[in-house]
Each structure stands twice: as structure tokens, then as C-alpha cells.
Image (cartoon, rainbow, N blue to C red):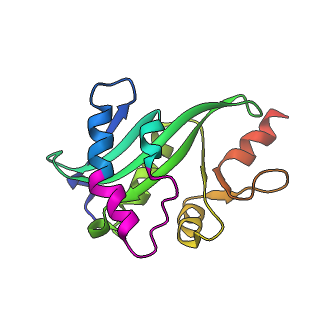
Amino acid sequence: MICHSNIKYLYIGKERDIFEEYANRCFEEIIKENLRSKGGMLIAPRAIWLADFLLIVTDKTYTNCLGIAAVNKRSNPYTFRDELYITQIAVKNDYKRLGIGKSMVQELIDNHNCDITCQINDFNTVSQVFFTNLGFEAGSGEDHPYFYRRNYYKSLKKTY
């Protein structure tokens, strides 16, 4: 595990001047590396430029990007609540299995009072286990089975 006092979180909204700079930097340093690694699962690597905001994990000097989550914020018509949709999450290969991915998702959970969803392909069992361990549930019923949601079904029951 990485010592969390040694990492910092940067939230960069699409409206900020530095958004494209950080998106390009993370694409070069993290996303491309994940695409080249054995078993890389990134289906839409350019999704980071379409995100409403980026959550970037850096070292405490803000010089090294260790992980990135590209996130969209939208309103859910069924629950009448805001929802975060994680379009991309990736960690530098040298920093995998140290808790950085988990810390990014936990940061989103702790600091946003809304449902969180992501889409995971059926062949990506590593991500399925990762998100399930963080309290996400696979879609069911009429939902697309590849969507994983956290607290969605509880909040849906509260609205009816």
C-alpha cells in the first residue's frame, strides 16, 4: 500500500485552462502505458477529453501523475439525483496494486453525495471484482448488465 499522506488529489474541470494540458499529460504517461501493457482493458482511451472533470492522483510534489479517473456528472431521470459516471480509470503500471485506484474511487464516494456508475465489459473480470469490492452492484433486470452502480438501487427504492 502507498502512504496516502504522500499523494494528492487534483480535480480539474473541463472549463479550466489546464484541463487539456493534464488530459494530454495523463494520456501520454498513464493511458498509453495501460494500452501497451499485457491485458490492457481500456476500450475508449480518448474518453478523458470528453469528461466533465478529471480526478488525478499525483505525488505530494504534484510532478508525477500516478492515476487518473475521467468522470461525467449527469442527472438521473429515475432517481432525480445527480450521478457521477466514471468513463475511465487508470493507474501507472509501476503503481498498480498499491491502493491508488481504490483511493480515487473512495475520494469520489467521500466527496460527492450522489450515485456513482461505470460500465465494465463482461470480459473485464479484474474491473468487475475491483468495483464489486468497493460496493458497486452489477446492473439487473432491464438495466444493461455491464453497468455497475453504487447505492443506485437503494436510492431508486427511496424514490418510489
Report x, y in % for residue 43: 52, 58
Residue beneath the point at 50% across and 52% down: 44
Q: Is residue 132 above or below residue 139?
A: below
The reply to whether the magenta stretch includes residue 111 is no
Between 50 and 62, which is closer to the camera in this rendering? 50
Q: Is residue 160 left or right of residue 92?
A: right
Between 44 and 139, which is closer to the camera in this rendering? 44
Q: Is residue 54 left or right of residue 73?
A: left
Between 132 and 37, which is closer to the camera in this rendering? 37
User: Is any part of residue 156 visible from this angle?
Assistant: yes
The answer to which quarter of the image holds residue 132 is: bottom right
Considering the image in quadrants, where does the N terminus appear?
A: bottom left
Report x, y in % for residue 52: 47, 32
Residue beneath the point at 85% across and 34% down: 160
Q: Which residues are magenta?
A: 28-45
Q: Is residue 22 above or below residue 105?
A: above
The reply to whether the magenta stretch includes residue 29 is yes
Q: Is residue 118 left or right of residue 64?
A: right
User: Is any part of residue 9 visible from this angle?
Assistant: no
Residue beneath the point at 20% across and 54% down: 6
Between 112 and 37, which is closer to the camera in this rendering? 37
The answer to which quarter of the image holds residue 17 is: top left
* Number of numbered tags placed on the structure image: 0
The answer to which quarter of the image holds residue 35 is: bottom left
Residue beneath the point at 28% across and 52% down: 28
Q: Is residue 99 above or below residue 7?
A: below
Q: Is residue 135 left or right of residue 156?
A: left
Q: Is residue 90 above or below residue 157?
A: below
